[in-house]
């Protein structure tokens, strides 16, 4: 049984523009389930791909077009190529999806595909033997040459490629550009400029950061990852993940204590109490209206920001996260695999399942349509600006150009849901809010993280570690 009562799938409902939620495959939104494993139909000609594949998908019930969009982006183009495959999309409620998947897999009935919101979340499924080896398919399709090496390596568990990265993302600092222009402010570039800017904002009754996790408690993990990179630094994180230093190192304690102190100062959403009660619509509204000036989050927010800012007179922009401690480099992009897709090792329709993956990673027209329509994120390949179609937000293009360039230059950082092992990532998600409420100190949190990391290291399930030049 996978030891995860609430996977990161919940994180992805508020991470997107909500046309499709936790299970949209091209949008790489949380766990996509392919119902009970599809079976090859007895009348399918030998050597011809056919049979049944069933996907359980989660859609936003408030959007009447969501199911049609899912059909058009997730199924129709594939069915056009493989008309003998009966690919069915079946809407499922988000609540209980992970438990339903675990029960099905444990009973041996499992789905044809398992998609997770990050490579760390895929590890327990691989450890349980649920994920098929994709090395041969990757070799046939040339994925090892096409993908950014760090991203593909994240799907290698116990020496086998079992989880294909569906997209990549980073953490950045968003801000209300109109508000900044009106006040002559510039985004912070270090701790001193951040403190000065926060003081100026507070003098005008403006919250430095909009924030809230009422709709998704795991949103705190984005801030944990941000502070680890901004204060301890990518080099220190790399060395800890390599087992060369401990997560009890003072640099990590300082990072977590700074986050707690900034919350206690009221910088994030007005304070801890307000943070826990602020919903996503309230969070975005505060940034749009100028009640808050900045927002620490990831690439997945672009669609939502455009939606919320769309009817206002204000506009938004973004910059790289600023370093918040001496010696930490600037213009660093923490790298994240925002989703993985795997084939169930017990699928009864392997040819069709493999054909779906081949289509998914080759149909660039549908991928760009998903980016434009539902805020999907691109697959992890070097970003070619000349291939961007009309109608794509230039801020999206700029952000992904920067991530791609940073990836190739190794000027990168790390996020917990991609580069940390399953035990460490679970410890963080289960205890991060306890640190904010004062029920766990920064020292205790880092000690627990160190112990969880050691469990992963002893089990050999720390994800492959990519290098960083950001030291």
Image: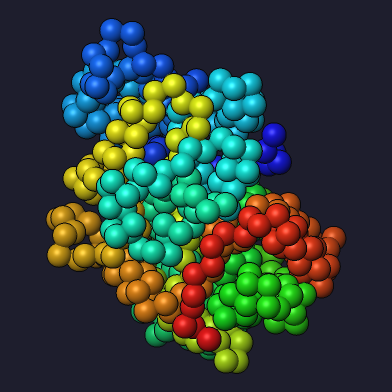
Residue located 33% across and 69% down the image: 404
Based on the displayed image, in which of its 4 quarters is residue 433 positioned? Answer: bottom right
Q: Position of residue 48 (x, y in %)?
A: 23, 21
Residue located 46% across and 42% down the image: 133
Give the left or right position of residue 439, taking residue 309 as reference. Answer: right
Q: Nearer the viewer, residue 223 or 418?
A: 418
As drawn, 430 above or below 99: below
Question: Residue 278: in sight, yes or no?
Answer: no
Give the left or right position of residue 86, taking residue 466 as reference. Answer: left
Q: Position of residue 395 (x, y in %)?
A: 29, 66
Residue located 27% across and 47% down the image: 141
Q: Nearer the viewer, residue 288 or 156?
A: 156
Give the left or right position of residue 247, taking residue 151 as reference. Answer: right
Q: Position of residue 79 (x, y in %)?
A: 23, 25
Residue located 35% across and 63% down the image: 148
Q: Residue furthest top?
A: 43
């Amino acid at each position: 049984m996978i030891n995860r009562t609430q996977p990161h799938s919940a994180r992805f409902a508020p991470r997107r523009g909500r046309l499709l939620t936790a299970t949209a495959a091209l949008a790489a939104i949380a766990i996509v389930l392919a119902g009970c494993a599809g079976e090859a139909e007895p009348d399918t000609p030998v050597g011809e791909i056919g049979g049944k594949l069933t996907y359980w998908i989660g859609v936003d019930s408030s959007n009447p077009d969501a199911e049609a969009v899912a059909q058009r982006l997730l199924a129709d183009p594939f069915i056009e190529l493989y008309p003998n495959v009966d690919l069915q999309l079946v809407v499922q409620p988000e609540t209980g999806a992970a438990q339903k998947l675990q029960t099905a897999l444990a009973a041996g009935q499992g789905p044809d595909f398992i998609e997770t919101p990050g490579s760390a979340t895929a590890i327990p499924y691989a450890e349980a033997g649920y994920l098929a080896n994709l090395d041969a398919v990757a070799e046939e399709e040339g994925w090892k040459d096409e993908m950014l090496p760090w991203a593909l390596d994240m799907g290698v568990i116990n020496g086998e490629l079992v989880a294909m990265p569906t997209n990549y993302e980073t953490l950045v600092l968003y801000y209300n550009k109109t508000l900044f222009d009106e006040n002559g402010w510039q985004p912070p570039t270090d701790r001193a400029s951040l403190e000065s800017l926060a003081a100026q904002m507070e003098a005008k009754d403006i919250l430095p950061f909009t924030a809230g996790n009422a709709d998704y408690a795991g949103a705190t993990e984005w801030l944990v990852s941000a502070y680890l990179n901004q204060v301890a630094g990518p080099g220190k994180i790399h060395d800890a993940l390599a087992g060369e230093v401990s997560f009890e190192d003072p640099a990590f304690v300082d990072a977590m204590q700074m986050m707690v102190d900034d919350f206690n100062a009221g910088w994030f959403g007005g304070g801890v109490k307000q943070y826990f009660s602020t919903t996503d619509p309230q969070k975005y509204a505060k940034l749009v209206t100028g009640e808050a000036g900045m927002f620490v989050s990831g690439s997945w927010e672009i669609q939502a920001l455009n939606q919320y800012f769309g009817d206002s007179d204000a506009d938004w922009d973004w910059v790289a996260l600023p370093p918040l401690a001496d010696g930490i480099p600037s213009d660093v992009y923490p790298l994240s695999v925002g989703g993985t897709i795997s084939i169930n090792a017990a699928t009864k329709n392997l040819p069709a399942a493999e054909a779906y993956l081949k289509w998914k990673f080759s149909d660039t027209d549908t991928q760009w349509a998903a980016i434009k329509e539902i805020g999907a994120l691109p697959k992890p390949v070097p970003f070619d600006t000349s291939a961007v179609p009309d109608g794509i937000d230039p801020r999206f293009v700029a952000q992904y150009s920067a991530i791609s360039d940073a990836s190739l230059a190794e000027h990168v950082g790390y996020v917990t849901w991609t580069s940390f092992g399953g035990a460490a990532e679970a410890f963080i998600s289960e205890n991060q809010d306890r640190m904010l409420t004062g029920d766990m100190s920064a020292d205790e949190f880092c000690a627990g993280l160190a112990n969880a990391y050691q469990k992963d290291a002893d089990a050999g399930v720390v994800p492959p570690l990519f290098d960083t030049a950001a030291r």
